[in-house]
Structure formats: C-alpha cells, structure tokens
Amino acid sequence: MFLGSPRLRWLVVLLTALVAASAVAASAATGPPRLATLDWTLAETLVALGAPPAAVAQVEAYHAWVGEPALPASTSDLGLRSQPNLERLASLAPERILISPMFANLTPRLERIAPVASLPLYRPGRDTWTEMRELTRVLGEMIERPAAATRLIEETEARLEALRRRLGDTPPPLLVVQFMDRRHVRVFGDNGLYQAVLDRLGLDNAWTGSTNAWGFSLVGIEALAGLDARLVVVEPYPAGVRERLDDGGLWGHLVEASRGTPIVLPPIWSFGALPSAERFAEQLVNALESDDAA
C-alpha cells in the first residue's frame, strides 16, 4: 500500500478518526461537546465560558499574542492555523471543528473529520460590541452553557462600566498602535475591538482615518505626525524593533510630541472577543491610573 497516494492518506485519516471517536464515546461523561478550533478568538471565548477546546492551532503563538485567558496545559496543538495537522486532528476525534471565515478554504478537508462551524466576527457594517455579544451567545448554545454566556456578557459589561467610573479627568485622545517593523505600525480605529472598548470607557481615539474590516490601518510612522494624542503601544514588538526605537528618528519625535509618556501594554489580541476586550480595558485603565498617581 503506497501511503503517498492522496486517497490512501485520507483513508488512514478517516480510520484514525473512527477509532479515536469510538474510544472517546466509550469513556465520555456528560459535559460540553469535544471541540477543536483553528481560531484564537473562539478559543479564548470557550476558555472564558469554562469549556476550553481540546485542540487549538499554534498554541505557543496563542500565548504570545493573546496571553490570557491561558489555554489548559492539556490542549493539543494542531500546528499552523492555515495548515493544520489533519492526522493529529483526526486522532483527537472532535465532535465539531470551529473556524472563522478566514479559514473557509479548509472546510472541505476538515469536514471529512468532523462537522465544521464557521463563526464570523468583525463583519463590515456591524457594531463590533453587538457582534461580540452574539458570538458569545452562539458559543454558549453550542457548548450547552447558555447561562455561562449570559454571565460572561453581563460580567464583562459591568467590569467595563466600573473601569469607566474609575477614570478621573478625561485623558487626551489616545493613539493605539502596534509595530509591524521599525517604520510601520497598525493604527487602530473604527470597526475594531480597541475602538469598541474606548467607546465604552468614554475615551477618544485620535485616529479618524480609514480602517480595514478588522479595525486597523497599516501605515508608515510618518502618517501619525501632527496628531494631538497620547501614544499607546500594544506589544509584542517584532524582533529587534524595540531596541532600535531608542535610536531617535521619527518615532522619537512622535514620543516628544505625545501628550504624556507613551503607554506600553502587554500583548492583547486585537481581533478577539469579550475576554480580550476586558483585558484591554483593564490594562489601559490601570496604566492611566498609574500616570495619575505619579
């Protein structure tokens, strides 16, 4: 038998999935369905709902870019989000595979292993906060925990309201960026998670330029010149960039013109849902309060 044949390779994948599914079914206790996902936004929401997925793509990168909520140590790594390890996925026998529309091209292959559900977020023309609430409820129904979804929504909104009340004098407009290299940044505005949080905190965004479907625009640093704002930098920095920023240049001039020392926040998933929204709000308000205290 030549395992190089695509048909035979798929036969091995399917047989592996059937054997694993039988083992899982034999020992399964009552609980949420066994899920796998390629999408970090869905993964963070499932963790926050108390039903973490059994498998996630690029687990190490999830922890670098998303940070919290952390995935359990038992989470299986499926490899690249764009090229998951199908044999490993089949061996885990998920009851359903969750993706976002970004990975729709993988659906035909994934459907040979388990039913696939594509859950959208950040659709053009939709209110971002409303979409995050809807996504949370859909996942709550999917894992048979609608009350947990309602609780997550209510607790997140209550927490952001409490953080809003903690802000003293209205800060200057903020300019939220993330470095792509030494000379280019993502600058965040309409349609994105950061903007949705700024709105709920009653804070102004200095960036009024255009953004893409995910709420950012990729610009050269020179595009930020002349904006009357407080700089907010969201980590991580690309390799070598942080060290070279201290060399001066255009970024140094922007820092000098900034309304206060630039705020540097830890990695927060800018394409996330309610967990990332609350994390961004917490980190931002804490930083602003530290400045007030100083």
Image (cartoon, rainbow, N blue to C red):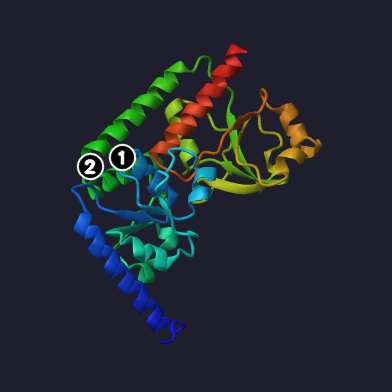
Regarding residue 230, the answer to whether it shows in the image is no
Q: Is residue 204 above or below residue 19?
A: above
Q: Position of residue 114 (x, y in %)?
A: 30, 65
Regarding residue 113, the answer to whether it shows in the image is yes
Q: Position of residue 212 (x, y in %)?
A: 52, 51
The quarter of the image holding the N terminus is: bottom left
Q: Position of residue 279 (x, y in %)?
A: 46, 33
The residue drawn where x is 69% and y is 43% is: 223
Left or right, 216 with reference to 52: right
Q: Amino acid at mark 2?
A: Arg
Residue toward you, 268 or 9: 9
Q: Quadrant of residue 250?
A: top right
The residue drawn where x is 43% and y is 22% is: 163
- Tell me which label, 1 or 2, sits earlier in the chain: 1
Q: Amino acid at mark 1?
A: Gly
Residue 50 — which label? Answer: 1
What residue would you read off at disc 2? Answer: 145
